[in-house]
Amino acid sequence: NFALRTITSKESCCQAADTSDDHLEMAKSYLRRFTFILDQECFGESLQSLSTTLNLKYDAPTFRTINHESARERINNDTLFEYLSLRNAKDIKLYEWAKNQSLVRCNNTYTNVSKVDAKEVGDRVLSELPAHKQLQIQNYID
């Protein structure tokens, strides 16, 4: 439960599979304070979208999505995978929640985004944000 412990700054927060839901909710409340959340799974696309949204110049290489094996496939041991999943269940829940809050949804990433398309992608991403976050961004840009 590294993420929970790091975000909540509470060394005593995490007891593996027995970690309280209160700590998960505390971590979510801290993350809700951020205007942008970026997912490392599609970090390049997220940086492109962020720079477009904020009208910043960002010359990035052409993006390509790399499909990695699943965690279960990489571990290659069902017993160990289940054990680790149980121990880190709250971190996994936090990550799944954060992915849905992310500026770019990685399962809908754009490959080979050209500079011409970047504005369109940024506008689409901006339109999907909650109204209060759109207002924060508009205030920043203006």
Image (cartoon, helix red, strand yellow):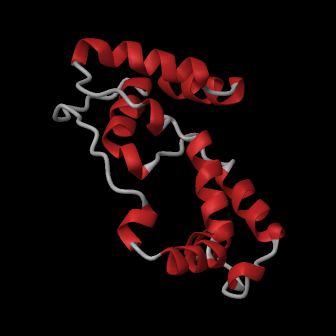
The answer to whether residue 42 is above or below residue 10 is: above
Q: Is residue 30 left or right of residue 101?
A: right
Q: Which of the two residues, 137 or 70, is positioned nearer the viewer here?
A: 70
Q: Is residue 57 left or right of residue 17?
A: left
Rendered residue at 58%/25% (across/down): 139
| Quadrant of image for the N terminus | bottom right
- Left or right of 127, for residue 108: left
Q: Residue at x 18, y 31 (%)?
A: 62
The answer to whether one can see residue 142 in this image is: no
Q: Residue at x 67, y 49 (%)?
A: 33
The x, y position of residue 86, in whole percent, is: 66, 75
Q: Is residue 65 visible?
A: yes
Residue nearest the viewer, comparing 5 with 139: 5
**What residue lies at 70% left-to-right and 28% top-to-bottom?**
132
| Residue nearest the observer in this picture, 66 or 100 | 66
Residue 46 spot, x, y in % from top left: 39, 38
Q: Position of residue 3 (x, y in %)?
A: 57, 69
As drawn, 90 above or below 135: below
The quadrant where residue 58 appears: top left
How many numbered circles are shown? 0
Find the residue positioned furthest to the left. 61
